[in-house]
Amino acid sequence: MAAATPEPAQLFFAVQFTIIPSDVLHDEYSLKLQKSLEENGAIHVPLNAHNRVDDVLHHTHIISTTADFPDYNKALEAMVHVVKPTWVDQSLAKGKQSNPRQFSPDPCLFFQDVVVTCANIPDGDKEAIIGGVLAMGGQYSASLTKLVTHIVALSLDHDKCELAIRKQLRSLIVLPHWFDDCLKLGKKLSERPYILPDPEILRPSSNLPIRYTEPLEHIKGATSPVAGEVPSALPSSSPSPRRKELKVFTGKKIMLSGDLQIGSRLQGTIEELIRSGGGSITASVDAADIYVCHYRDGHDYIEASRAEKDVGNLPWLYHLITHNAWTSPMRRLLHYPVPRNGIPGFEDFEISLSNYTGEARVYLENLVIAAGAKFTRTMNVRNTHLITAHMMSEKCDAAREWNVNIVNHLWIEESYAKCAVQSITNHRYTHFPARTNLGEVVGQTQIDRDAVESKYFKADPITIRQKERLAAAGAPTPHPSNGSVKPRPAPRISKSVVPQSSSTAKFSGNGTDAHAVPSPPKGDVSENTTPLAKKTKHVRSDVAAQTPVARHMDGKENETPDTTGSRGAKARALDKLHKLAPDVARFEKEMKRKGGVIHGGRKAGDSDRITLGKPAAAEQGRKRKSGEEDECDSAGSRSDSEANEDERKAKKPKHGKQVKEKVPPILYRMMLTGDERWIDDVKKESREKAQLRNLGVLLTQNASEATLLCAPKLLRTRKFIAALAGAPTVVNSGFLDFVLKHNRIPPAVNYQISDRDNEERLGLRLCESLDRARQNNRRLLRGWTIFVTERIGGGFDTYKEIIQLNGGVCQLYRGRTGVTVSKRNKNAPDAGAESQHQGNEEGDILYLVSGTDDEDVALWEKFRSTTREQGLVPRIAKPDWLLFVAMAQQIEWDEKWLCKEETVPGWMEKHGPRE
């Protein structure tokens, strides 16, 4: 008899799943999915009575349309797949389980709904786009199917594009630029400006306003950390079925913090809403499931956060009531409690906004204030940052003129989310895609839980084993919130000495942990609330620690306050911490030695080295290396420069403020142009910039302050030409190579640029130009007003900077009437050596520097007539004239630089000869 053939394994065999209900995933759809999965071998694990997952470890998959449900983080930690319902449909269609990552609802995977196919684009671009889409949760299809959402093409001349148009598929045909801009910003942008056949980004530059869509979903109900009116009326008096069925608090215990500062009437209203929604009120943070407060400090906040309870502010609570649906308080930045004194570093910033409107503007205004910066509605020269959605505004023009930092909203959002000021050198914060209003992606940044934990409620470093030892010895255990101790009965132990190893925490006699810094409500400690916790576990004490004695008064122990702890206890703990700093610094120095603490040993020359049988006196008269800064150190001087460096970094004054390490004075302010050594290598750039700074070379992007100009050859870049006005020392790239390789500055004369070919081509000598620049003293164009068109090649700002750095006045010319310019006075009283390089022209010639596109050429006749009306002679010059003047550092004129309509290709055919 033939053996029975085993049945093939079912498609969803060994899958244990649950379904998270939502507005999209309603009951009927959920039952359909459940049936499809169970028919193919899956096992359904129902939610509990409160619509929560009882134990994520009993699941392999959780099906949800969003990552915004209470057990999402637990599922990720347990390696449980969270997938969208389309995972089931795709798996059934393919006959095998699809990759869960491509169906994740994680908002960080912003291409999760994208299925891309490529048309007529280069292979290299194709591979890059496919890799980026897959990495960000999207999918790739080699052929065009109904599931494809995006076709990447450079034109419509491809079979896939023609088929999509003919079949009227819903696929969008976009330029590759869309993927590039999305990946640069880390957000999914609107495809509108990139759609073929007529993408906006390829149209001639236009001043038409950029279309904007309000991002209501992401900031709805989260535009301010301060709550507005109570949502609706009480459920008992409201006829609304939605409010009568309020169940978002079912089975939950909510604690309202005292820092909300709400009146008794309002509090009563909120409590009644919570009770009618199935919840209850508690005054104990240990019993609470939800803790509502305004600030990120206090004993209750720290304990609730460490216990992984839901911690949010009052606007978040109102949001739950309004929508009758749970949402994480960390999903929206202003739904989470605010830092009492803002984010460190923002107190020195003065920030303004541009091109954001409606709720997005209100949200960003409040975010700036919550971060601790000063917000100004109007721009002024005192502003440090301008946050803008695109670059088309008068504020942006003023910011460029005043050297104000221009960033997009991602900078303020991610700085707030990560509890630290983010560097504006990150290109994500200064990238503005063409014809795109970044206001559309406002509010998509979420709170970084790891950063908040590290800053505000870092876990107590004491281990379980240490707690057991302390309990056996009768010592009080540090409280998890602030390093103070919980009162507990303990026998009085008189001066019993307990040996203490390097891994055992040390405690002061009053029961306060000397190594754990309290978490003060005002955030006046550094970013890590326990800055020495990681280090002190290695410290070996020369004196055996005594077991702390429990102090009694009137037969009872002193009770620790229920609030954030005694100020005196905090002050004592901080004082002890600062006293330990020199020991910790010396330990860290020893750890850096070859062999470490055990085998490295102390150097005989160390002044604070204690030798048995000998007095611990500091050795006198030791010589130091030349150029080394003198340091006042209670322990004496070190024997080598590394020890001195480590001592300077670790040493702290009595008041607990970190002493900044001394850096050498600035010898050169170097501007670098035409060098590509740091492209796509941020770490190398940061490392080598720090190396240069330690040698006295500071890199600058401001041409007005450059004293050293480094370039591979003679260039016509904006930086090179603008910097020449200040007569800097000009060197080739070999100078920088030598500095980075040998860690010292060579004579600049050995690395002068020698580029005769380019000098012949441009008609100048660099050495002569620098000589004239020194004589001109940035006054070559003194008294000159030069007009420049807006659409000139290279941009108006480039020519404006060059003219201004050479002492002239640059004005934008748009063909407006009423522009008046006076005649130049060649023999002005303030004329200096620059006058000998200003040519032999009379002062009645007025220049317009213009490009040759149709919109610029159309302005020429208007400029001529306006200039003649003022008794001046118009002269329309090519950009090459101004570039030559700035590079040669003398004013000359040649007819080859004159712009005429007759020489513009196609102009005469379209418009005929000029009258």
Image (cartoon, rainbow, N blue to C red):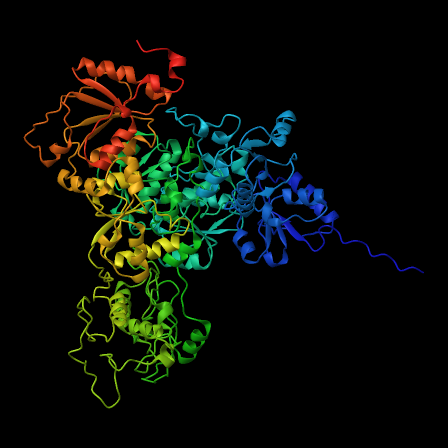
- Is residue 264 visible in the rendered structure shown here? yes
Determine the residue located farthest toward the right in the rendered image.
1
Determine the residue located farthest toward the bottom in the rendered image.
613
Residue 578 is situated, as x and y percent measured from the top left of the image, at: 26, 68
Please tell me which residue is depicted at 49% across the width and 28% down the height of the picture: 199
Determine the residue located farthest toward the top in the rendered image.
915
Position of the N terminus, as image quadrant, is bottom right
Q: Nearer the viewer, residue 891 or 581?
A: 891
Q: Is residue 753 above or below residue 597?
A: above
Position of the C terminus, as image quadrant, is top left
Q: How many marks?
A: 0
Please tell me which residue is depicted at 49% across the width and 45% down the height of the picture: 327
Please tell me which residue is depicted at 44% across the width and 48% down the height of the picture: 330
Left or right: 492 with respect to 821? right
Residue 367 is situated, as x and y percent measured from the top left of the image, at: 35, 42
Residue 876 is situated, as x and y percent measured from the top left of the image, at: 26, 21
Left or right: 460 with respect to 88? left
- Is residue 35 visible in the rendered structure shown here? no
Using the rendered view, name the quadrant where residue 765 is placed.
top left
Q: Nearer the viewer, residue 770 or 896?
A: 896
Using the rendered view, name the quadrant where residue 719 is placed.
top left
Residue 518 is situated, as x and y percent measured from the top left of the image, at: 32, 63
Left or right: 827 with respect to 712? left
Q: Is residue 366 above or below residue 311?
A: above
